[in-house]
Amino acid sequence: MQGGKKQIFSAADNTGVVLEAKCPRCARKAHVDDDMENVKCASCGYSATYDEYIEVMKGRAVMMADDFQMNWDKNPF
């Protein structure tokens, strides 16, 4: 353990690195499997393929950009 955090080791490379993603349902950490095929959240049970996850998050990024632009157009400074 380093810094009070438990390390999780990947079976594929034994580096201790686990790819994490933000869960679109609960906003906690979701885990991406070693093959980059699935995203799963232990907190809320969210599960999707990696491609589905990317599409959901891409849609959120576009909405954030649109909201920013709309607010900027109303009040630039």
Image (tube, rainbow, N blue to C red):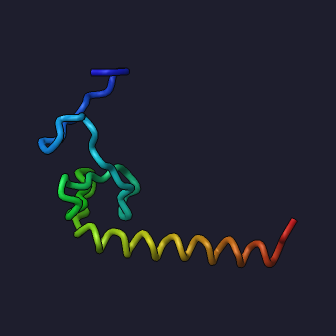
Question: Residue at position x 32%, y 27% from top?
Answer: 5
Question: Residue at position x 29%, y 72% from top?
Answer: 51
Question: Residue at position x 35%, y 58% from top?
Answer: 23
Q: Nearer the viewer, residue 72 or 45?
A: 72
Q: Is residue 40 above or below residue 67?
A: above
Q: Position of residue 65 (x, y in %)?
A: 61, 72
Placement of the C terminus among the 4 image quadrants: bottom right
Where residue 68 sits, quadrant-wise, is bottom right
Horizontal arrangement in the rendering, residue 18 relative to residue 11 (left or right)? right
Horizontal arrangement in the rendering, residue 44 relative to residue 64 (left or right)? left
Q: Is residue 18 above or below residue 25?
A: above
Q: Is residue 72 above or below residue 44?
A: below
Question: Residue at position x 37%, y 51% from top?
Answer: 28
Q: Position of residue 3 (x, y in %)?
A: 37, 21
Q: Position of residue 59 (x, y in %)?
A: 46, 76
Horizontal arrangement in the rendering, residue 25 relative to residue 34 (left or right)? right
As drawn, the residue found furthest toward the front would be 13
